[in-house]
Image (cartoon, rainbow, N blue to C red):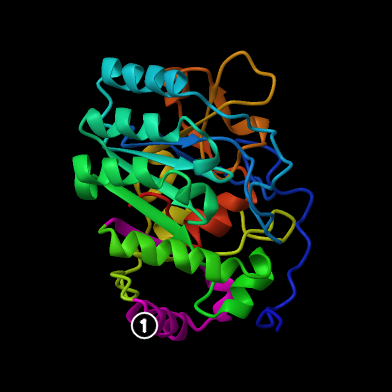
Amino acid sequence: MSRPALAPARPLDPAKFRDPEVTAKGERRAVVPLVGLRTLWVNTGTLCSIACRNCYIESSPKNDALAYISAAEVAAYLDEAAALGAPLQEVGFTGGEPFLNRDLPRMLRDVLGRGLSALVLTNAMKPMMNHAAALLALRADFGERLTLRVSLDHHEAALHDLERGKGSFAKTLEGLTWLARQGFRIHVAGRAGFGAGDEAGMRRGYTALFAAHAIPVDASDPLALMLLPEMDATADVPEITESCWGILRKSPDSLMCASARMVVKRRGADRPAVLACTLLAYDPRFELGATLAEASRSVALNHPHCATFCVLGGAACSR
């Protein structure tokens, strides 16, 4: 089975996304100030238990470009956020596969013990199940302040497995149903590109799947079931200018970088770094410093993903 056919993308104009202040046409580029740090993302490391065909961060069983971050390093950022008076509400954990990092349960307990919410992006496969006892303890102690967002690219096994490998759908569904039976708060992330523009049909398909397996996720809720746009940094997309806010009737405050930052630990680095966005882990232009204070400056929307995923795609990583 193949992906639904999509219109061929034009190659990116090399003149675009070069200058952080102006576009290729000489217009003022849109900039997003940090309104307040409400979500702190932690990349636990880029190693993953599987290798997807199109992973935005190139995670795989071999990619350790982002090393495992430690619980102590995460705690230092939580302490800094508190000292700065940041309006922090949630800490999200992404990877790679976060459950490959053995410190993840300690990180989650630290976050939740501070009264914050925690979100983990996972494929719900063996690495997650290896931490079943720790997860059950966290659920017992903190309830719905812990959310697991499971990547299930399509409601049919053939298309999901096309992206993530033969048999992966069954293994993810097994983990998802375990979470449901144990009473965890669950969200699901799928790929909008598989729907070939038929979002309503995609949501109906997920609704049927969830009902068949007693999975308490409302597929009509765009937060509970996120259908994320495909991202191709080589495809031509519009640059976002200051005038776009009025044309699109969108506020810069609605973008992730207005209220979120991500912490990563690069392989061989002495200490973690703070990035503007979860999507741009390898672009040095979006590394803002070593501390949250240093990373509080504005972000220029100087990357194709800024347009595709956030401004035009309307996606978000927080809940």
Would residue 240 be seen by someone viewing this image from the given angle? Answer: no
Residue 131 part of the magenta-drawn span: no
Q: Is residue 251 above or below residue 78?
A: below
Q: Is residue 201 magenta?
A: yes
Measured as percent of width and height from the top left, residue 259 is found at 36, 39
- Provide residue 156's location: percent of width, then percent of height: 54, 80
Q: Position of residue 290 (x, y in %)?
A: 52, 17
Instruction: Tell me if 57 is positioned left or right of 247 in this view.
Output: right
Q: Could you say which is closer to the camera, residue 74 or residue 83?
A: 74
Q: Which residue is mark 1?
A: 212
- Residue at 26% across, 34% down: 112
x and y percentages locating residue 120 in the rendered image: 41, 46
State which region is magenta.
184-213
Point 49% across, 54% down: residue: 310
Number of marks present in the image shown = 1
Q: Quadrant of residue 10?
A: bottom right
Kind of residue at badge 1: Ala
For mark 1, give the secondary structure. Answer: helix
Q: Quadrant of the N terminus?
A: bottom right
The residue nearer to you, when weighing 128 against 17, is 128
Q: Is residue 112 above or below residue 217?
A: above
Q: Nearer the viewer, residue 23 or 50?
A: 50
